[in-house]
Amino acid sequence: MWTKTVLITAFVTSASLTGGTAYAAPATPVGGPALGSRGLVAPEGVKKPPKTKATSYVIADVETGQVLAAKDAHGRYLPASTLKTLTALTLIPKLNKNLRIRPSQNACNQEGSAVGLTPKATYRVDDLFKGLMLTSGNDAAMALAEVNGGLAKTMREMNEEAKRLQANDTVAKTPSGLDKPGQSSSAYDLALIARAGLANPDFLRYISTKTANFPAPKGKTYQISNHNKLLWRYQGMIGVKNGWTSKALGSFVGAATRGGHTIVVTVMRHEGYFWEEVGKLMDWGFSVRGKVTPVGQLVNPLPAQAPAAPQARVSGGPVTQVTPAHQPPLLDTAAQKQTDRTKAVGAAVIGGGLLFGVVWLVYGIRRRRRGGSGV
């Protein structure tokens, strides 16, 4: 059960998908019409949110979903490693955290930030999630995708999870957030993802861990630490995720709790040092929550699809469900025609046999009436 919560999401842009991209905004933006604005949307009667180099942001109450202020909430931009929040949210419920794996060379060779995976060591899935969320390991992201059944399956499930959350501005192309054409998210979507993640106990445990011992070959370990500097600097900070690429620039998703209320801040494509600005945005959120008219709403996830009805069992035996891949191939045209002819001939034979039987029966009845006997 949630305590009273405030969520702040900030998102920064430029003119193309090296930072932002032109897109057709929906007629009615998710969360309310005001959130379709590219400019600042703030409540009246209170001081405006602090200035920031972030071009886009969202401030919302997580418990109620009320958006308190926003700027370019649905602008689509490169998410960098903040996309790992979606990776974690998607895979945590699917994977056994105690499963031990040996990563592939492909996973270990991922470019960019890494936790230091090697094929010479084994890791629990729990270790991989720590490497993903503490040190932003791109190697851990790929290893988790491989454990989940492969990159294609994982990307499909991440995008399905985004749609379930109604994070419709989000298109995931990598599990790590490394820049790739077509990949995008928005301030609003990151707010939805963060809100859902904070409701997951394991997600919350990973993002709030400051340091951890990480496995190394030959049974040794080394210490890793969380890249979220505000875990040490901001009162009540409980974490989430930061990121950076040369195209996306600085990005950050953070959450803090004070007096039973929580604020989450996401900053993306920040051109400089953003930690102090994030703290001021959080302070503003704490100061106005419950006192202003919201400018929008964080929508709830779509209802989960009902599972298919189980197939009835026959004579207590095992149930076998035939999928299209396991169905026998269709007959070719010639064979189909032959089958049709065979059916026609068979019908004629059966019909003729029935007619002969009727005739013979009538003949026998007449003989009995004449005194004869049948054999």
Image (cartoon, helix red, strand yellow):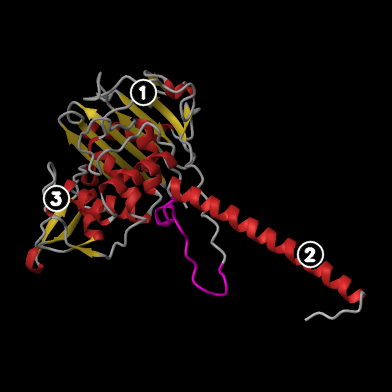
Q: Quadrant of the C terminus?
A: bottom right
Q: Nearer the viewer, mark 2 or mark 3?
A: 2
Q: Residue at 36% across / 40% down in the picture?
A: 263
Is label 2 in contact with label 1 (beta carbons under 8 Å)?
no
Helix, strand or loop under label 1: loop
- Residue 235 position (above or below residue 92): above
Dot 1 or dot 3: first in sequence order is 1
What secondary structure prevails in the magenta region? Answer: loop
Residue segment shown in magenta: 313-331
In percent of width and height, residue 122 lies at 16, 64
Q: Which residue is mark 2?
A: 359
In percent of width and height, residue 174 lies at 24, 41
Q: Quadrant of the rendered structure where residue 60 is?
A: top left
The CA distance from mark 1 to mark 3 is: 37 Å
Residue 50: image tag = none
Question: Which one is in front, 208 or 18?
Answer: 18
Q: Nearer the viewer, mark 1 or mark 3?
A: 3
Q: Which residue is mark 1?
A: 72
For badge 3, the amino acid type reads Asn
